[in-house]
Amino acid sequence: MFALDFQSRQPIYEQLYWSVARMAALGVLEKDETLPSVRVLAQELGVNPNTVQKAYALLEHDGIICTVPGKGSLISGNASALEKQKRLAADRLRTAVHDAEEMGLVREEIKAVVSGCFGKGGEQK
């Protein structure tokens, strides 16, 4: 369900955080959908349960999931939390464009790179 890159420099808990946040924002994970327990997900992913717990704690802090005693962790469906994630993604994109301009890329080159991130029909590669 969640793909992790163990060769990445990004910590596993952050990868899991962003994976859940992205799937919630895209509607792949729907409101009130139950996430696997910390222990089960850790075992499935082959990671330490503390890693999963840290990701879940951050997701709960940001309002993306909520923990209900006896039911586990659920996707909250909190529209403001999902909008916040979209705003953060837009901010990172603006920063990347600014950095590219600072490094000498011109507008057409930046547009070409961004367009290259999408396949035919505007779908992301």
Image (spheres, rainbow, N blue to C red):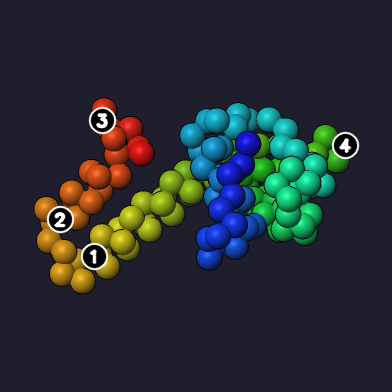
What numbered label is drawn on residue 109?
2
Residue 9 lies, in percent from the top left, at 53, 65
Type of amino acid at the residue the image marks with label 2: Glu
Please, what secondary structure does the residue beneath circle 4 have? loop
Give the spatial CA distance, label 4 vs label 2: 53 Å
Give the spatial CA distance, label 3 vs label 2: 19 Å
Q: Which residue is labeled 3 in the image?
A: 120
Labels 1 and 2: the sequence-earlier one: 1
| Left or right side of 92 for 103 | left
Labels 3 and 4: the sequence-earlier one: 4
| Left or right side of 9 for 95 | left
User: Which residue is at 41% across, 51% downward?
Assistant: 89
CB under 8 Å between callouts 1 and 4? Answer: no
Residue 44 lies, in percent from the top left, at 74, 43
CB under 8 Å between callouts 4 and 2? Answer: no
User: Which residue is at 36% across, 39% downward?
Assistant: 125
Please, what secondary structure does the residue beneath circle 2 have? helix
Q: Quadrant of the N terminus?
A: top right
CB under 8 Å between callouts 3 and 2? Answer: no
Q: Which residue is labeled 4 in the image?
A: 70
